[in-house]
Image: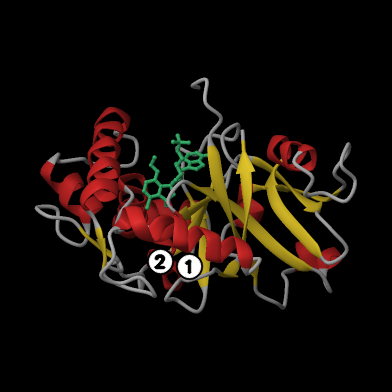
Amino acid sequence: EGVQPQEYTVIKMELVAPFPDKFKVLEGKKVFLAAATLRPETMYGQTNAWVLPDGKYGAFEINDSEVFVLAHKAALNLAYQNYSRVPEKPSCLLELTGRDLIGLPLKSPLSFSEVIYALPMLSILMDKGTGIVTSVPSDAPDDYMALHDLKAKPAFREKYGIKDEWVMPIEIVPIIEIPQFGNKCAETVCLQMKIKSQNDKEKLAEAKKQTYLKGFTEGTMIVGEYAGRKVQEAKPLIRTKLLETGQAIVYSE
Ligand code: A2H
């Protein structure tokens, strides 16, 4: 980690009622999977959420009506950042693993899909961000490959009890146009670099570097309120809007 603190936008992905049995104790509250992102302007392209199957998560009471599902360490950090009503000790209402989260239906801000599902990603680090990632396969190479793996490998879906209907209908949503990379830059770069799976860590790190820089410096939004504007201009505007409307919060570490 660098010297500069990383400032994330945490997107509130709302659990759709009725809740499954394990989550019944949370009924009557608004429950969100809290996903940390550095690219709030890409939220139009969300197709699903990612969780680590063996990761330990908790459902933490954030205020009188809201509950966040996230890694314990992130809940503690949030408390210090004054988002929990009991600052020194955020109360965990329910202990969870990633497996409990797989298949949850969610409603996420700006996504063109009415409902998206939580699915497994094996490269999630539990000590970074919130341990929950929102998936934008058009622009994030990690997301593109993890989705590719799920679609291509029935045994992988079976292992985690994933219904085909959560995965197979997913289509990549073009949201940003980048010269030479087109409007699905993650796919372009993963194909060019012949990346085979989400476990191809070194190549994926390189793919991320390329797309991240290109997207920010040369990308143009092709959807949403700021269609036609450069990513650089749209990013802070979209972020501010998400924060002001209560659909996201700031999180730094
Ligand atoms: B980004 P940095 Cl479209 N484990 O959001 C693994 N990856 C994580 C994570 C964790 N615990 N927490 C967050 N991330 C991902 C969008 C996105 C992201 C796009 C393009 C690139 C991109 C949609 N996924 O990140 O190491 C999140 O994915 C490329 C850097 O703190 C988050 O932003 O720099 C990013 O990694 C944070 O990574």
Number of residues whose C-alpha sits closer than 10 Å to that of mark 2, classed few (under 14), some (14–19) or many (20 or more)? many
Rendering quadrant holding ligand 1: top left
Label 2 residue near ligand 1, CB within 8 Å: no
Mark-to-mark CA distance, 1 and 2:
7 Å
Asked if residue 52 can be seen in this view, the reply is no
- Looking at the rendered image, the disc whose residue lies closer to the viewer, 1 or 2, is 2
Specify the amino acid type for callout 1. Answer: Lys
Classify 253 as above or below 111.
above
Left of 88 or right of it: where is 21? Answer: left
> Which residue is located at x 73 percent, y 38 percent?
72
Left of 189 or right of it: where is 59? Answer: right
Q: Position of residue 227 (x, y in %)?
A: 30, 72
Q: Position of residue 145 (x, y in %)?
A: 31, 48
Classify 209 as above or below 136.
above
Q: Which residue is mark 1?
A: 163
Q: Secondary structure at mark 2?
A: helix
Q: Which residue is mark 2?
A: 167
Left of 173 or right of it: where is 74? Answer: right
Specify the amino acid type for callout 2. Answer: Val
Classify 24 as above or below 145.
below
Q: Which residue occupies the foreground of this view, 209 or 214?
A: 214
